[in-house]
Image: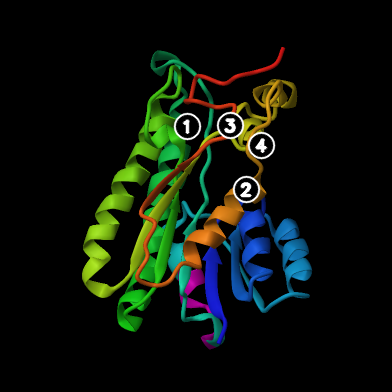
Amino acid sequence: MKKTALITGATSGIGRATARALAQNNYQIILCGRREERMSELQKELSELTEVHTLLFDVRDKEKVFEAIASLPSEFSKIDVLINNAGNAHGMDPIQNGNIDDWDAMIDINVKGLLYVSKAIIPGMIEQKSGHIINIGSTAAKEVYPNGNVYCASKHAVDAINQGMRMDLNPHGIRVGAIHPGMVETEFSEVRFKGDTERASKVYQGFQPLKPEDIADIIHFVVSRPYHVNIADLVVMSTAQASSTIVKKVV
């Protein structure tokens, strides 16, 4: 019987690559995201490989999260793997110049959104006495860097929630782990710099960053381990990256 994986933020970047990787490895997929056109395109692509269901919602909207997950048809209602991938960075200003709307967006998506989705799915995993939750963090969860303030705080929160979640769900046989990527070439920087594609592209110039597929391969490896194996916390960077601020670039 196929396992079912629910992936938030599935319409781009790591989420989309993970959906493809798991579909290719005999999982049925629940795609969650905000962009309907992209979702439809990905559903059509993956439906040639496996069964796919889509849920259109913003993780910030608590009511929509619970309504969407409650609406799952019976054949998708037993969720074996939850990938809490949805997340964003907005702005890169020193704390005194920070935009409060940016702060709200990062906390609402990266922290509260992760909690809402988890809260909607965990009861089912407890009832079935099995499940695997993967929380996508960041190297920003492990170290703070200049002008990263609130984004780093939100990812530090993901790290703490991951640890607490693993402890609380331990009696129920549910695996919980986090994957913390370094610099991955996605739309991340374009969103952070609010559509400034020139500035965003410079982030990844002069070195070989991680690709979304690199993280997707790792996620598949983690969820495919024997059930007694739980990879609890994993930091992944490209060879050129030594920390959030140290990257070997060829000029």
Q: Nearer the viewer, residue 210 or 155?
A: 210
Give the side of residue 15 with respect to residue 140, left or right.
right
Magenta-span inclusion, residue 88: no
Magenta region, main secondary structure? helix
Question: Which range is magenta?
Answer: 67-74
Give the side of residue 214 with respect to residue 135, left or right.
right
When the figure is inspected, residue 35 is found, relative to residue 203, above or below; the finding is below
Mark 1 and mark 3 residues within 8 Å of each other at the beta carbon: no
Report the residue marked by disc 1: 101
Q: Label 3: few (<14), some or many (≥20) within 10 Å?
A: few
Lower position in the chain sequence, tag 2 or tag 3? 2
Residue 200 on image: x %, y %: 68, 26
Q: Quick one: quadrant of the N terminus?
A: bottom right
Tell me which amino acid carries mark 1. Asp
Q: For the residue labelled by badge 2, is the local secondary structure a helix, a strand or a loop?
A: helix
Q: Label for residue 214?
A: 2
- The nearer-to-camera label among 1 and 3 is 3
Lower position in the chain sequence, tag 1 or tag 3? 1
When the figure is inspected, residue 221 is found, relative to residue 239, above or below; the finding is below
- Tell me the residue at 34%/44% (across/down): 159
Residue 241 on image: x %, y %: 55, 27
Tell me which amino acid carries mark 4. Glu
Lower position in the chain sequence, tag 4 or tag 2? 4
Report the residue marked by disc 4: 185
Report the residue marked by disc 3: 239
Q: Label 4: few (<14), some or many (≥20) within 10 Å?
A: some
**Distance between mark 3 and mark 4 Cα atoms:** 14 Å
**Distance between mark 4 and mark 2 Cα atoms:** 11 Å
Report whether residue 110 is seen.
Answer: yes
